[in-house]
Image (cartoon, rainbow, N blue to C red):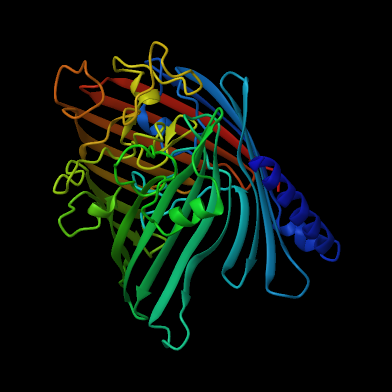
Amino acid sequence: MALRLIFLLIVCVGCIGLVAAQDSVRRWQDSLKFSVGTVGTAASEDFLPFWLVANRYGTMKDRKNDVSTNIYIYNEHAIGKTDLQLSYTIDLFNNNHFNDFTLVEANVKVNYKGWQLRGGRYREVIGAVDPTLSSGSLGLSANALPIPKIGIAVTDYKNIPFTNGWLQFKGLFSHGWMGKDRYYESYLHEKAFFLRVGKGKLKLFGGAVHFGEWGGKRGNFSLDRSWTGFWDVLMVKEANDGSTPSWSNRRPNRAGDQRGTLEFGADLETNYGDWHFYNQMFFESGTGIDIRNIDRLAGLSLTFKDQQKKIKKVLAEFIYTKQMENYGKEWQSYYNNGIYKTGWEYRGMIIGTPIFLNRVRGSRFLPIQPYNWQQNEGVEGKINGNSNIVSNRIVGLHIGAEYQPFDRFYFKTLLTYNVHFMDRSAIKKMVNNRYRQFYSLQSVRYLLNNKWQLTGEVAWDTGQFYRNFGVGLGIKYTIF
């Protein structure tokens, strides 16, 4: 139903775009982007090294060797002589030895002076993290396949009237469909709001991001999927959505499976480059919104202004999630939930930071198996709540760099070290309470000309979980 509604929206808005394009064929051709490409990957183990599969929007299959081919189409139209613009994207991948076709992006967006109405699958990272070098937002990262959504957004900061440019805002509001490939077929609610202060070289910002999985349905059983249920999730109300039996005298929790981030940071412009500092504080209950919460992702990046400089951008990030609101009445298990048993995962990949481990990825090197979400309760291998994300207590350091030592060559380096603390893990067969792991990636992109592009990647992982070496080779041809 969700995909049909989004497809109808794409068709309707696309027709408007085609009508608008009749009077501007040349402009339509100038804005069209059309490319095809393919990437081959291979690894020493039966799965890929971390950075060859993580933060790629689910486009790479985690197997020993594969070929991933894609077709990408993007276009935008100015509607008449107004400030109204329409754009659409199609990004289709074929992989898993030519057996799988995946629409990574299929969307339409209508923009008006910085306001955007959008629907479909679209690539998006929610949070103030660096967009190209970060290990991944604690909220919505680039790791999983995009979730089908409809929503409205202000993607770039806009001045608030009567503040003389000193105060700006941005944000988003979306409704999504999590699909059937999980314990509950369910909806997604997400919203974010950020404020920024300053009009000079130093700007301070802060905001909040909220996610809620709700309206779960499994077989003939359904949790609250009504407008009242949506309002309870929207307002983060304490309400019984059907998950608390009426005969029990227990106080109901907040409706749905909810989580979010509180964020603050600063942007500083200097003569040699732009500094960007960000801090995400993660929470999964009201208890987490507390000064005592020390779980966070913090990062600092520097983008150099000098185009002749060989180093383009550098980043350092620190992540800590050991506390899990233990100063409150109960510990949380980040990204897990007792009712919504799939947790913060979509199509087998974690939606937030990929450094956490779920059962799908963990089954490659740990004594566990992924859950079959369609199996019946009560059979052997029963699905237990709070057990799909198997490692979420970590301490880690991540650094990255983008640089161009030679003309037409663009390099990127990622180095990640983390420690997984397993003493509260859902896995009962672990030998140690902590496991150290290191991930690395070296990639190079070569622009042969304005049509052809070659890519090469080398990844190496080592540590107490596993050791693995992998390579990727790709070619891309831009038609328009």
The residue located at (47%, 24%) in the rendering is 373
Front-most of residues 333 and 88 = 333
Q: Evaluate whether residue 127 shows in this view.
A: no
Percent x, y of residue 460:
32, 27
Where on the picture, by quarter, is residue 274? bottom left
The residue located at (51%, 59%) in the rendering is 173
Location of the N terminus by quadrant is top right
The residue located at (50%, 36%) in the rendering is 455
Percent x, y of residue 336:
33, 36
Where on the picture, by quarter, is residue 101? top right
Extreme residue in the top direction: 380
Extreme residue in the front direction: 247
Percent x, y of residue 312:
37, 55
Front-most of residues 352 and 336 = 336
**From the viewer's perspective, is residue 254 above or below residue 84?**
above
**From the viewer's perspective, is residue 400 above or below residue 443?**
below
Front-most of residues 413 and 373 = 373
Percent x, y of residue 241:
44, 45
Where on the picture, by quarter, is residue 67? top right
**From the viewer's perspective, is residue 329 above or below residue 333?**
below
Front-most of residues 180 and 440 = 180
